[in-house]
Image (cartoon, grey):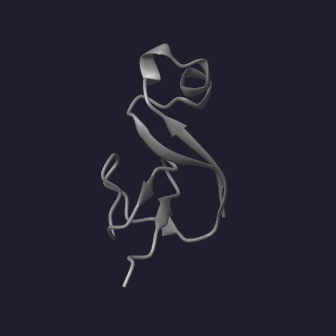
Amino acid sequence: MAKRTYVCRKCKRFTTDKECPICKSTALSASWKGLIVINDPNDSEIAKTLGITVPGKYALFVD
């Protein structure tokens, strides 16, 4: 059985845990819109605009 995917409401990072691996927040949501994958945040204009500093999978909007 696949684990349910959640999105952190604070930093918008995807996780399958009960706690965000980046900001350690437990405010997670299963409702989100838009998906962005950042491979190199230092060389990405989108990452700079969104304030993303760690590579990974992020949601654009979290309910």
Residue placed furthest toward the top: 43
Q: Residue at x 48, y 14 (%)?
A: 43
Q: Is residue 52 above or below residue 24?
A: above
> Quadrant where the N terminus lies?
bottom left
Q: Nearer the viewer, residue 3 or 22?
A: 3
38 relative to 29, above or below: above
Residue 5 vs residue 12, the one in the foreground: 5
- 11 relative position to 19: left or right: right
Q: Is residue 40 above or below residue 25?
A: above
Residue 50: name its quadrant. Answer: top right
Residue drawn at (44%, 76%), measured in percent from left and top?
4
Q: Position of residue 12 (x, y in %)?
A: 52, 50
The answer to whether residue 29 is left or right of residue 34 is left
How many numbered circles does the render carry?
A: 0
Residue at the far bottom in the pictured view: 1
Q: Residue at x 37, y 58 (%)?
A: 25
Where residue 49 sits in the image (x, y, percent)?
Answer: 62, 24
Quadrant location of the C terminus?
bottom right
Whether 44 is drawn above or below 52: the answer is above
- Please give the name of the residue rendered at 30% of the width and 52% of the height, measured from the top-left corner: 21
Which percent across, then down, holds residue 7?
50, 60
